[in-house]
Each structure stands twice: as structure tokens, then as C-alpha cells.
Image (tube, coloured by chain):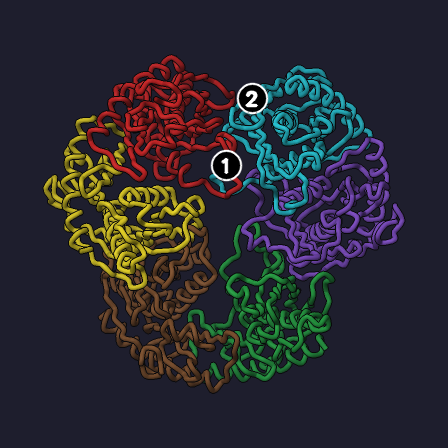
Chain colours: A green, B brown, C yellow, D red, E purple, F cyan
């Protein structure tokens, strides 16, 4: 029934190639099916003004899509002169999600910027960005710990994300682009390794949904996140 | 226990003054406690390029905050040269939420723009904007129907929104600003008059939450939306 | 002869509702007929770089119009990415006019920003903004004096503004929108409570005028300002 | 008493060199003392959307200042990413002033853009721009008439401008920069060749003025404009 | 003597992985040593206004660098609100260079946009972009030819680019970043497969060079381009 | 054969009028045929952040074109909201070229900004800007030396620039606009007074060229630069 032939609760294959680029303190190329996102984590000593002198750290994120990551070429945001609304929304979500898994006292007064750039898109880019972004963050923090710059681990629990939606009347796990563009209801579920919720964004475009349907998607999401956390652990071991 | 002395499941007083401005096809000033939002609905014959010729209508929204709607003066976005990320996120949410209650075929090929401008802020401005925006939309559509420009009612069900969160360890309904700035977990719940869900956005900043907690907030939200829909009906009767 | 049926030298009814919003140090909603402007005055300790350390204060103004303050919806300036030429011109005028009534030594090294946002427009918005802006400023300065932050009153004389023009060949006081859009010559006259001039801006679009005509408009303006100053005093008493 | 040693009613020497650049349909370099403005008039067949099909013509203006036209280098507006408020205000004034002397029916459905670029500034640049801009316009219109594209002269009367102010307590004609930066009251007076008024902008910064003082400045301005119109006629003969 | 231990006339290893992303009509990841550039070619039916109806095709290019492609994180251009001067310069060079190898009549009235995004930088990114960009272009054109949309091959000759410079007093081929940042003179040489010149950009920063030195760098460049053209042919065979 | 009737190796007449504006520390109006560029050099005590405290000086340049410097009016860059790619490219080239002739130690920690504004364009504006820019720089540095602010001359050798190209199959010196717009190959050659090369930019649009052709253009360029350096010396003597 699904365009890809997958089972309703079947995720796309996930792979995470670490150290994909050499300059960043942490980096990986995450592939969730045909969605490929390059994630890098950059450590900087400066922090945003609002936490200067607080002793607390900060994790922030930026998101971008290469112009031809998509089926038809999109205008480059640098040429358009600003990031689009969708981009801004996504990068705020990634930053908020990753911060939920960070002990900012343990991190100390420094900032880590996680850049997530989509090389190829096939649905679920923001979820892949969060999942891969956490791996890049993990690798960068490992360097801080190895160097003794950080004493106790500031990453308290992995953070991973998956989308689920109602496609052709059925709840399905991990929407790809053909499903995403048809689904009347879809949600992004961000959770910790211990399945605590960090963020739920579930929206309908020209439709509505019941609490019952919401719960079924949450069940699927828990299942998907479990798999993603396994992949994260394997990659960043 | 709440700074305002309200019960955990007690909303702030809601008032909706319709026809607050004279030019718009529909307008109201909604007050949810000390949060005051001016909502106007403007009917235009032109539609966005992507639906030209489709026969379908469109509802979109824009959101703004006067510089001194808040406790300390914020920079005017027109001076800053762009809308901030938070603004963009909110206005996309308002548009998406209102569209979920619209039969776009019945509306016909026209656009209604709902402008929500916060005159005074005390938490929950996006929810007030959705709730009041629907009233402005209702009034504008009434004019279309009265003029015979639209034959069957394109507004299938009211749309209202409320925030809930976990404050001082307790689930509370309708966060005001002092609560909002302290709550580790808060959510915005957008529903129809028949309590179907349109959008759930529930996020934690530096914290996580369980499914159980999520369900308790949903219970509160249903209760709040019921009250809001009453107020909407009274105002737009 | 006037579309509104007013006498040539008859102003529209003026009302000023103070403390319209709660956060600003001073605020009012001024209504000059169907023109409604929300004015707030915000006190800040920082001053512009060019007076830092001078001991002098500064008063500045910003002006905006809600998108549907007008008969047809205008594009939001924050979306357009910049303030239009008309907006910039008006807010510079408001700031300059208000400063003319301020003893900057007595004010001390602080800045007061007067925001004037048009909720509903029917001609004469810049004049209403100046007149209402002065009331907001007065209220804010009252707080400074009450708190003992300012010892002698920095507001030496009220500042008020009115437009006059030549409509259908006749000099008329207080142009409303239907008159303003037809008038070949119109002027904005900003004066103090003691009828000293602060600024005269009198322009013709596709026409010219004589010194005699100019003098007749000045006579009308003096009359109008007298009434406005009464209203200001009553409101800010 | 004046820094330049001029009499109170003495203008700076005025020279107008026509055809200063070769591409524009009309051009001149106007020098009012040490204020030098290059003015060009460009004829285009396209008109702004709001008059398309009306048969009416349009005259508009743009204004700029080279970065080192002034005593200390100013930031280039193209680098800053926008025209400043002062620039916008001035170019709107120039356009409005020139249009007041144009018979838009006679001009026919075409646009003439007058660019005024200050090569060297010493006070009074906007007035020099209007006076020189009219000469460039005159020369461009001459070409239209010579070519038979326009049958009756659309320039009904010359347009010229001069500043006057109260300097050291005395009304003075044609403020140069040292006077302009000290004057508490100054005005720009735009008139036709027959001394009808087009625009009066008279403002006080941190001061006020009486109607009597205003009248004295108007007297001086009439005198100055008479001289300027002579220079215009000599140049564009 | 070179930091990398390479001979003076020794290039870095070159690899070109085609079809690196699936959506673009042509794509490759080119690696010149540690410089990695993702190149995609997108075919569009619309052409720029200035060639509409001419029957001629157009090839253009855009260039970007991921924020952490470099040793320290650079600000994202989409966030900064515009492309920097260096970016603009480079993408104009890439487009101009590729067009020199295109028969625009044979291409027909369509546009191909070549996007070059640097995933990892180690000097010579613009040259790698041109060399890899040509491969992406070749692959896209192959599709047009296979589909019969283009009858004779519009790519008349391969286009490749290499940098050379004077490092530590010696002419060296293919500067890497450590060399590039030290070299007083460096040049970019763009040539065709038959060693005709397309563009030479040779500049000194705080230094000068003789014609003799220029000729020696040209000799090296010819050698390097020969190798690159081999790699291009192997990849796009 | 050349549209202007010039010999293949004949330059246009060159004139340099110094002190064209009074505020800049150095200024000139350079005319190369019908190309007229106003160059000013402004000395500032502040330097860019990256050399603060280094004791080294900096020379930078900005370039602009008046809207009607060209045959048809171009949009003003300040109105467009940014400098175009061509402008950015040119001003970077001017700055780099002038710096090549500067001893930055001798200059001391100060910045000189050279503004080059094209009043009238007829091809070769960037070369005229460099040649005239050096004269303005020379004059400004003379003032520094006269004032004893700089002890040894920081200008080690004049810097001048000329364009050459292949027009109608022939190598020609100093392209004017009609030639420039037809030439398939053209180059800009920046050299010192002692004929050392600073920058060569030679590009083909839709064509290629041989090393032999390149050498012939270099020969012509050396000849042209010799003449320009004479003119510079005469002007700034």
C-alpha cells in the first residue's frame, strides 16, 4: 500500500557515516532512505549575549538545503537574501530539541553550533537533521571530554526524531516524500533515548485528527526512535 | 499556587469585541486576560499563484506585535528589516490552523488574509490570535454569504486555541506570561468546535515530558477550547 | 459642502483614552474622528551614541500602520523588509516635533521612544500621532517626576498638530480622508500650546498656492491646535 | 556676522553648466557656492503602474550623495543596503516639487526621472537639486518638443528652491553648511517663476518660531528664487 | 619544500564520483585532495529575459560553501542576508568559464544552472568547482541528447581549471590552503581540453610579478589541466 | 577599422583634474576619452578589525556608477538595496590593485578609502578608476607626509590599469564601449610604473584565446600603462 512497498511500521534503512568532513569537531552524513543530511558540530568559545557570564553553555542549530536537493531546483536562500519561514522554523526546532538533551552546566560557558545541510531530500529532513545532529554533537563533546575541557558528560540522553502520519487512512512510520506530500495529518516526534518526549508537532493541513489517532502515531514514533537511537549509538561508539 | 491565584484548570476571562475597526470585512479585539490582540480579516480577489485557476480559496495570516506590547520595548520588525523567526513561525501556525476549518471549495477562488496584531501581551498571544482570528474570519465570511458571493458556508467548524503547560510541577490551563516564562514544558493546542485536533505543538526547553503528562494537558486543553468556542459563538452570533 | 457635512472651520470630535496599554510608561488611544492612533512612550536608560556622556536627553518616535487600518489592505512593512518612504518621513517629523517641546537638559541622559501605531486611518494620522504622542510622553514624564528621577519638568509646552488644506477651493480645517485625497494643497501645522510654530509643511501636488492662502490656513490651524491642546490637558491632567 | 561675510539677504554665487554628461536627455552641474549637484533627466517610455493607460505623464526624482561629498566620509548607501530616511525624504520632495510645474497631460504617457547626485556638499543640497533638476528637465523636454514627441510645452513655469533660516537671531538667505548646522530654525521654500508657492517646509529643532519670523523668511525666499529663476533661464535658453 | 611534500609540479589526487545526488540531471562530488565540491546541473525550460525568443541557451552557475567547510566556522550567507563579494565573484567566473565551452545554438533555448557547493575546503575551491561543474553539465547534456531534446552536442570541448602560484619563491602547481594563504602571487587558469585559454586571473596581494613568472605559471597550468581533463573524461565516459 | 578611427595601439586622450572636490584629502576627475570617473581618497584613523594593533595600514576602495552614467538609465544600487555582482567585483579589484603599490608598514595604522564614482561611462571604467584612484591616493598621502604623520613614502611605485582586447580579430589598446561590447576576448592589465604586473584578468565570453594572443595584448598594455603613468606623474607632481 505504501509507495515504497514498506510495512506500515517499517522505517527506511538508516546509515550514519561519521567524520564525513575533517574541519568540524564532530560531523556525520546521515542517510534515512534517500534523505541525506550532512551534520557538523562546531565548538566556539563565545556564547550568545544573554548567557554571558552565566557559566552555562549553549547549543544552537542552523539548517539549509542545497538548491538541487529537491526534485525541482529551489532558489538558493543566500541569493534570495533571507532564510525562508520553513527554514527558520526547522532550525529553531533542531536547536530546541538538541538542547533538551544537554546539561548546560556540565557543558560550561561555550557554544556548539550544529549545522544541518540537506544534500538530498526525500521527506523527513528535519527529523534526520536532529538524529544526525545529535551524533555530530556527541562526537564534538567527546573531543571536549578527551581534552579535559569538560569533566562530566553534558549529553544526558540521546535525542532522535521521526515523522509519522496518516497516509491513505493508515498510520504509517517514517514518511517519505511521496507520502508526506499526500498525508493530511503528519507529526514530528522528538524523544530521548529513554523515550521521554521533547517535542511533538502534529498538524493537519485541511483536515483534523482525533486523540486516538494521535496516540497511534505516538506508538509508532516510539518504535522508530528506538531504532534510531541504536543507530546513533553504533555510529558514535 | 499560580501567580494569578487562578485554579489549575481556570482560564483567564475572555472577551471579544467585534467590529473594532471599520475598514476590514471582519474585525475584533480579543482579550484573554491581559493579552489583547486586534484581528482583522481582509477579503481579496487575487489568490496565490499556486492555486490560480483551481477554483479553491485560500486563508492566510500575518502576525505582529507592537513594539511596546511587552514589558520592555522590542525593536519594530519593520525597522529591523525582517520578521523574526518567532513571528514567522506563529503566522504560519495561525494560517494553517484557520485553514483546517475552511472548506476551500465552498470559499471559491478568493483569499482572506487574517492580520493578528498584539496590542498588549501577557502570554498566549498566538492562541488568542487564532481564536480571535477565527471570529474575524467568521464575520468576513458572513458578509460574503450575505452578498451572495458564497453560497454554502465555507466555515465548517470553529477553530480555537489554548496553551497549557507544566508549571511548578502541575499541569495548568492557559499560561500567562509569568507562568510561561517559568514552565519547562508548554504546549499549544488547536482544536475545532467538535474537539477534533488540528495542531498540537508541545515542547520542552531544557526538560522532557511523559505521554502521561501530555494526556493531562490535552484534557485541560479540551476544557479550555470548549469555553473559547462559546465565547466565539456569542461574539459572532 | 464638506463630505462630512462639517463647517469649514470645524474639527472632527477628539477623544484621548489614557493608559490604553499597561506596559508602557505612558500610553493613550487618540481618536480624531475615525482616525485612531495608539501612542506609547517608553523610557530607556540608553541614549543614541551621538549624545552619550552629554547629559542631554533624547526623544524619538516610530510610526506604523496596521495592514488593514486603511480601506484596502496594505502590505505589512515588516514583510516588505523595510519601512516605506512615507513612514520614515512621518516618524522623523513626529520625533522632531516632540523634541521641540522638550528641555533636554531637564530630561537628563535618557531616551524616550514614542511609538505611534495607526489602528484605523481616515486622514490626518501624522497629526493625530503627534498630538497623542505628546500625551503619552507627558504621562511617561509624569512617572519620572513622581519617582524623583527628573527634578524640573522637561516638557515646556504642549505640542499638537493639525492639517488644513484647500478643498473645493475653500480653506478647511482638519482634513479627513475623502478631503485629503482630493485637496490640491494641504499642510500640516505643528505648534506649541502658546501657538508658537514648530513645523509647517505645506505642499501642493500638481498645483500651487499664494502666501495669502497660506495665511488663511495658518489661521485655521491656530484655531484647531487650541482645541487639541485643551483635549491634551484634559486627558493628561 | 555671517561666517562667509555675506549680507543677510545675499545668496552665494550660482552657476549652471548644462550638458555636463552626454548620455542623459538633459543634464547640468549646478553650483550654489561650494554645493555642487549633478542633475540628469532621463526619459523613459514606461510609466508607473498607477497611471498606465491614463495618458498622463510622470516626473520622479532620485537623490544621492557621493560618500566624500561631505566633510567626513559617509557610508555609501548601496553598501548600507538602503537609502537613509533623509535621502528618501529629499527625493520625494524633489519629485513632488518638479511635478508641480508640469502639465502632465501635455507631457503624455512617459516618465522622466531626474537624478540629483551631490558631488560636493556645503548646505542647501536639496534646494540646489530642485533648481538644477528643473534645468535638466527643461533640456530633456526641449528634446521631446524638438522631435515632435510633445506638441505643447508641458513645463508651465520654472521651479526653484532656496533655504532661509534664523541664524544668530537674524533671518538669513541661502544657508551654507556652517550656518545650517547652527540655525535653530530653517526652511526650504519651493516656488514657481511667478513666485507662487509649491512647498514650504519650515522646521525648528529644539526651538520654535513666530508667524512674523516665518513671513520674514518668506520675503527673503522670494528674493532668492527670483535670482535662481534668472540663472535657470540663462542656462536653459 | 611544499607543506604537503608534493613536487613543485605535482597535483593533488583527483577523484570524481558521478550521480552523487539523485534529483539533479547531472551531479558529481569532485575531490581535489581535501577540497570536496558537490556539483549539480539542473535543466530548466525558462531562460533569462535577455535571451527570450533568441533560440539560444544559457548556462549559469551558483556557488556556496557550507558554514563548516573551513577550518573555523563561517557565517551562513543565508543568515547574513546576502552572498559575500567573494562568492559573487566566484560564481560569475564559473558561469562565464563553462559558457565558453558551450555552443549556445546547439543547446537551444533552455537554461542549465550549475550549483557548486563546497562541502570541505582546502584551497582551490573555485577551480574544483569549474572542473566538477563541467562534469555535471556533461551528464545533464547527455540526458538531453539521449532524450532527443538536443541533436548535436552543445559541449564543444571540456573546461577545466587549476590554480598555480609563487610559493616560497617557487612556481608551484595546484595550491592547497596552507600554500594559498602564504603565496604572494597566485592565479587561476581556466582552459579547454585543447589547451586554449578561457580565463586567466592572476593577482598579487602586496607584491608584483614579471611576465616571465607569469609564463612559468601558465606552463604549469597547462600540465595540470591536461590531467584534469583526463579525469573528467574518465568520470563522464 | 576601429569605430573611433583610432589606430590599433592608440589610446584615448587622458586628462586628470586634481582637487575636483574640496573635502577629500585627495581627489581628481580622470577622463579617459568619454569615460569620466571622480576619485576621492579619504584618510581615517580607524582600521579594519583584522589589522587592529598590527601597526600596518590599509587601503580599500569602493566603486559606484551614477544611474545615468550609461546610455540607458540603470537602477540606483542604493534603491535596489545592494551592490550588484559587477560592482563588488570591481571594487575588490581596485582595492587589491592599489594595495600592491603600498608599503603598509610605512603607511602606519590608518585606512585610506578610495571612492571611484563613474559620472559618465564609455568603457574601461574600472581601469580609469584604478589609474585615477592612485592619483587621489598620492595626493592624500602627500598631505600625510607634509604633516609629518608619515615619515617615509608608503607609495613605492605608481599603479595604473588599461584594458586591451581582440576586436574584429585584431588586438587593440584601450577598448571603448562600442568595442568592449563586441570583443570576444578582453583583459584588464594592472601594472606598476616599472611595468611589473599586479593583476591580469583576461577573459573570453563565448570564445577562447591562445597564449600568443595573450602575449600580444600584454605588449599593448605595457605601452598603454607607460602613457598613463606619465599622466599620473604630471597630475600629481
Taking depth in this image into account, of C36 and F192 the one nearest to the observer is: F192
Taking depth in this image into account, of F161 and D136 the one nearest to the observer is: F161
Label 1 environment density (alpha carbons within 10 Å; few <14, some 14–19, many ≥20): few
**Rendered location of residue A152, percent (x, y):** 65, 78
Residue ID for mark 2? F19
Horizontal side of B176 relative to C179 (left or right) equals right
Element under disc 1: loop
Residue F132, placed above or below residue C228:
above
Question: Are the numbered discs 2 and 1 placed on the same chain, yes or no?
Answer: no
Which residue is rendered at x = 57% and y = 25% of the image?
F27
Where, by quadrant of the figure, is residue D226 drawn?
Answer: top left
Which subunit holds the residue at mark 1? D
Residue C38, placed above or below residue D115:
below
Answer yes or no: is residue F186 visible: no
Taking depth in this image into account, of B82 and F97 the one nearest to the observer is: F97
Horizontal side of B97 relative to C157 (left or right) equals right
Element under disc 2: loop
Where, by quadrant of the figure, is residue E65 drawn?
Answer: bottom right
Q: Quadrant of the C terminus of chain E?
A: bottom right
Q: Gap between marks 2 and 1, in whole Å? A: 19 Å
**Rendered location of residue C124, percent (x, y):** 24, 45
Which subunit holds the residue at mark 2? F
Residue C32, placed above or below residue B205:
above
Which residue is rendered at x = 63% and y = 69% of the image?
A133
Residue ID for mark 1? D74
Which residue is rendered at x = 58% and y = 80% of the image?
A192
Answer yes or no: is residue B98 visible: yes
Which residue is rendered at x = 52% and y = 34% of the image?
D73
**Rendered location of residue C58, percent (x, y):** 36, 47
**Rendered location of residue E91, percent (x, y):** 65, 45
Horizontal side of C141 relative to B72 (left or right) equals left
Amino acid at each position: 500500500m505504501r509507495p515504497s512497498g514498506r510495512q506500515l511500521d517499517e522505517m527506511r534503512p538508516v546509515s550514519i557515516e561519521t567524520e564525513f568532513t575533517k574541519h568540524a569537531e564532530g560531523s556525520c552524513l546521515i542517510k534515512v532512505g534517500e534523505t541525506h543530511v550532512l551534520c557538523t558540530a562546531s565548538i566556539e568559545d563565545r556564547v550568545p549575549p544573554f548567557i554571558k557570564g552565566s557559566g552555562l553553555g549553549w547549543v544552537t542549530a542552523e539548517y539549509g538545503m542545497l538548491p538541487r536537493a529537491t526534485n525541482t531546483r529551489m532558489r538558493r536562500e543566500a541569493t534570495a537574501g533571507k532564510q525562508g519561514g520553513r527554514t527558520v522554523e526547522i532550525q529553531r526546532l533542531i536547536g530546541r530539541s538538541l538542547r533538551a538533551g544537554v546539561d548546560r552546566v556540565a557543558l560550561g560557558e561555550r557554544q556548539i553550533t550544529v549545522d544541518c545541510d540537506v544534500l538530498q531530500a526525500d521527506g523527513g529532513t528535519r527529523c534526520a537533521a536532529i538524529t544526525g545532529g545529535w551524533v555530530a554533537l556527541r562526537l564534538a563533546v567527546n573531543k571536549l571530554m578527551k581534552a579535559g575541557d569538560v569533566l562530566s558528560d553534558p549529553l544526558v540522553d540521546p535525542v532522535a526524531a521521526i515523522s509519522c502520519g496518516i497516509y491513505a487512512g493508515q498510520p504509517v512510520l517514517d514518511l517519505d516524500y511521496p507520502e508526506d506530500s499526500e498525508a493530511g495529518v503528519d507529526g514530528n516526534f522528538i524523544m530521548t533515548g529513554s523515550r521521554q518526549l521533547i517535542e511533538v508537532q502534529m498538524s493537519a493541513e485541511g483536515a483534523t485528527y482525533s486523540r486516538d489517532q494521535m496516540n497511534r502515531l505516538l506508538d509508532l514514533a516510539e518504535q522508530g526512535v528506538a531504532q534510531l537511537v541504536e543507530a546513533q549509538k553504533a555510529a558514535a561508539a
